[in-house]
Amino acid sequence: MRAFRSRTTYLLGTVVLTGVLLAGCGSGDSSDSAGMSAADAPAMNEAAPQKAEGGGSGTQADTQAKAPDLRVEQRDIIYRGTVTVRVENVDAAAGQAGGIAKTAGGFVSGDNRSSGSGADTATMELRIPAPKFDAAVAQLAKLGTEEQRQISTEDVTEQTIDLDARITVQQARVDSGRKLLAQAKSLNDLVMLEREVATREADLASLQAKKRNLADLTALSTITVTLLDPEADAVVEEGPPGFLSGLGAGWDALLASLRVLLTVLGALLPWLIAFGLPIWGILYAVRRYNRTRRAAHPAPAYAHQPPPAAQPPVSGPPAQQDQQP
């Protein structure tokens, strides 16, 4: 009995000691791993951003290389200006305005001059390089007494970028179509591919024409200068459309229509008198003659009497025949 108890006690002690040793090892391992993680965490956190920066540097550089430059000085802007100046001599001032345009590197694209009733005016359209737009406007304003100035701008950067992308895609389509055309083996394929290539080339030419137009407008600004002599009336800018302007336009249209109608009637009146009166007289005489003739020869009376009404049949019992015995 005592031996059994001693063995049981020995076994229990062995189990308890083994559990204590295992718990100590586990805590030591966990503490070591926790300590290692805590010690390595800063290094790993520092390495992660460096890796991210190193890995994303190429993509970020490529994105910056492909992204368009949209700074103010790199944007495509169309400048338009209108200047009204009152001068002593319109012809001399017009010559000076043309000289300003040529000195700035531009040219005169339109020149409209008029003189009458002692009032001379000139309207000139100048194409000036965009970087010298402001300087040219200032010089034109100094030709005399400036009465009006209006400057407007239009940013077409997005349109230019879109056109560039569309031109690139369309050029690739044209090249692929030409390659397929060179490899055509049958007459039907040749005709179909020629038609497709011609369509693609026409679309590409249209896009390139739009791009050239935008490039011309952005490279050369447009300035419209109006020169007035001291006796000329000032140029009045029309206000925005509204009810009163619409009413005035409708009234002017009505008066113009009445003038046209009266002009047409005045042109037709001699013809109406020359041909209309004789025709009316002939028709009147014919109608009068017909009335007189009908009055002299009245129609017979019986012709106007209505026909007799039909008598309804008399209904009654049939006649009885004598029966012989």
Image (cartoon, grey):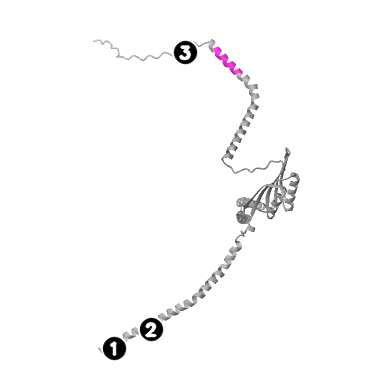
Q: Which mark is residue 304?
A: 3
Query: How far apart are the alpha carbons under marks 2 and 3?
Result: 149 Å
- In the picture, which quadrant includes the C terminus? top left
Find numbered disc 1 in the image and state the secondary structure of the residue it sits on.
helix
Q: Residue furthest bottom?
A: 3
What is the span of residues highlighted in magenta in the rendered image? 281-293
| Image height of 322 relative to 119, above or below | above
- In the picture, which quadrant includes the N terminus? bottom left
Closest to the camera, between mark 1 and mark 2, is: 2
The residue under the point 37% across, 83% down is 20
Residue flagged by tag 2: what amino acid is it? Answer: Leu
Q: Where is residue 305? Give x, y as percent.
A: 45, 12
Residue 197 appears in the rendering:
no
**Closer to us: 19 or 232:** 232
Q: Where is residue 15? Give x, y as percent.
A: 34, 84
Q: Which mark is residue 6?
A: 1
Closest to the camera, between mark 2 and mark 3, is: 2
**In the image, residue 308 lies in the stretch drawn in magenta:** no
